[in-house]
Amino acid sequence: MRLEYMILIAITLDLAFGDPRWFPHPVRLLGRLITALEGPARKAISDARVAGAVTALTVILAATLATALLVGIAGQIHPLLGDIIGIVVLYTTFAAHDLARHSLAVYRALVKFDLAEARRRVSWLVGRDTERLNEREIVRAAVESVAENTVDGIIAPLFFAALGGPVAAMAYKAINTLDSMIGYKSERYLDFGKAAARIDDGANYLPARISAPVLTAAAALLGFRSSDAWRIARRDGKKHESPNAGIAEAAVAGALGVRLGGVMERRGRPVNLPEIGDPLERLARKHIMEANRLMFTATVIAAAVFLGVRWAAVTVLGIG
């Protein structure tokens, strides 16, 4: 089966079903591997940066080889089995359904005026302290998470899937999982997680920049502020502490006419982040719904563009 069809089936499965809780998701397996390797790596290598780099490269290599072997062996047993396994692997790398499910759970709690439940739900999406957030701060956190994860959970996996199939998509998932687990600037991971963070920055460099025109196009199709999406992405995209996350956040802020960023708390300490976007509208619960509409529309656009480019490259130019 052509890779384009496999990716199309996989993204459709994700949009329809998301991540079944009973399924042994690769991210959970990768998380266990990272946890298992951290201690021995720190003991064996005194330099935390080197230990972290060895851990990161080991996890990425393990994920890449395991995926290649799994898909290859399945294909040797029967080509159809190889296609099915490849589709399942691809399916696990996309996260549109679950991103919407978690963020809309925040929205539903706010509609019921249940701030405690909204805080609990949004804590699953963000790394900041959520215990004292008011409604606007909860909305901001949810919208920022949807914006950032539109790249990490959708555009980037689609990009790597189109580039190198299930193996490349899973390698990216390993990189992203490493960053989410050890790529923090905390005392524990400032040095150990530096390599993981840098690798993630490199992997997301192109997908993050592709997100600006994709989200601008999505805003245009939805009748949102498309010109502002593009303008704010260019103006404020580089303000974020991450070299990549700010681009999608800025595009979403512009499309919705809201301001993101600002003060938040992490581990009880205030953190001042650059403000992104113009406050043309006051942040409200409706913006969580609108951010999800942008995310889903961007998913369709990105899939169409990446698969179209790949089809043209393979069919017309004979590449791949």
Image (tube, rainbow, N blue to C red):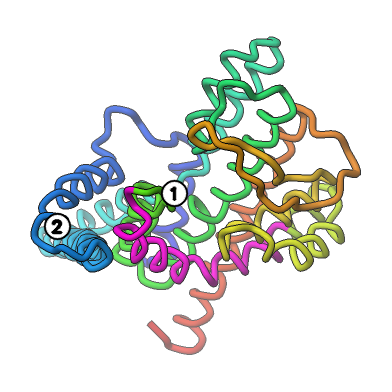
In the rendered image, residue 115, in percent from the top left (x then y), is placed at 64, 14
Viewport quadrant of the C terminus: bottom left
- The stretch of residues the image draws in magenta is 188-215
Q: Residue at x 75, y 35 (%)?
A: 287
Which residue bears the numbered disc 1? 94
Q: Which mark is residue 41?
A: 2
Q: Work out how far the residue at label 2 is from the one at label 1, CA to CA, in angstroms.
A: 30 Å
Left or right: residue 18 versus residue 224 is: left
Q: Nearer the viewer, residue 113 or 310?
A: 113
Magenta stretch: includes residue 213: yes
Q: Residue at x 32, y 48 (%)?
A: 188
Disc 2 marks which amino acid?
Answer: Ala
Q: Which mark is residue 20?
A: none
Q: Nearer the viewer, residue 204 or 301?
A: 204
Marks 2 and 1, the one that precedes in the sequence: 2
In the rendered image, residue 137, in percent from the top left (x then y), is placed at 69, 30
